[in-house]
Amino acid sequence: MAEFFYYAYVTIQPWTYFLTVSRFGLTYVGLSVSPIFSFYPHRMLVHNSEKLAPYVKQQKEYFAGTRKEFDVPIDISEFGTEFQRKALQFIQTIPYGFTANYGDIATSLPNATSSRAVAHAVALNPVLIFIPDHQIILSNNQVGTYRLGQKEKVRLIELEKSHLHGNL
């Protein structure tokens, strides 16, 4: 039997985000529906703005600079490998407004074979923004790539830095 994911859209300029939740938490944040099936095959999608309302609210607050930490449940239990899940869980511990590089994360994780393995996990992150992979940069302090584009990665880093010392 296929599992249901509930979904909703939220427009925060310049994007319209597509969000899904399982019964355990947020499973996907992206710009289109199709990639979700590569992360989670055999899911049925049911539109339900009410179930997504807390996530949409927190995402809007993040972009408004009034939220520096997300406290809604995130469910990546079925995503990727155990190592990839651990890398993404580690990324969630990076404080708002700060960056880390792939090598820093690799040396912080047990069984990390290389910064490339971390980079691969980051590239596959199904929960953009809520798992702040935009905060991960190259060891030479260059921004590096991002699924929404390098320009968007810079915008997110700058957004956080601009609100870092503001009131929550």
Image: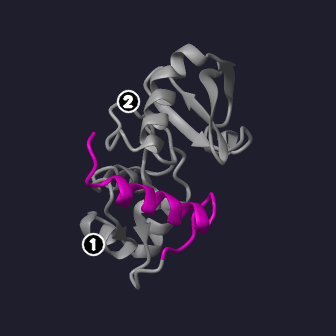
Looking at the picture, which amino acid does disc 1 mark? Thr
The scheme the figure's colours follow is: one colour
Viewer-closest of 3 and 126 = 126
Q: Residue at x 57, y 41 (%)?
A: 29
Q: Residue furthest bottom?
A: 140
Q: Which residues are magenta?
A: 143-168
Secondary-structure class at tag 1: helix
- Is 89 above or below relative to 7? below
- Residue under pointer 2: 73
Q: Residue at x 67, y 18 (%)?
A: 46
Q: Position of residue 71 (x, y in %)?
A: 32, 32
Tell us which disc is closer to us: 2 or 1: 2
- Residue 126 left/right relative to 18: left
- Residue under pointer 1: 107
Q: Within 10 angstroms of label 2, few (less than 14), some, or many (20 or more) residues?
A: some
Question: In the rendered structure, which disc, 2 or 1, sits on the residue that comes first in sequence?
Answer: 2
**Number of numbered discs overlaid on the protein picture:** 2
Q: Could you tell me how far apart the alpha carbons at marks 2 and 1 are, in whole angstroms?
A: 27 Å
Q: Position of residue 2 (x, y in %)?
A: 65, 21
Q: Position of residue 72 (x, y in %)?
A: 37, 29
- Residue 148 left/right relative to 33: left
- Residue 28 left/right relative to 24: right
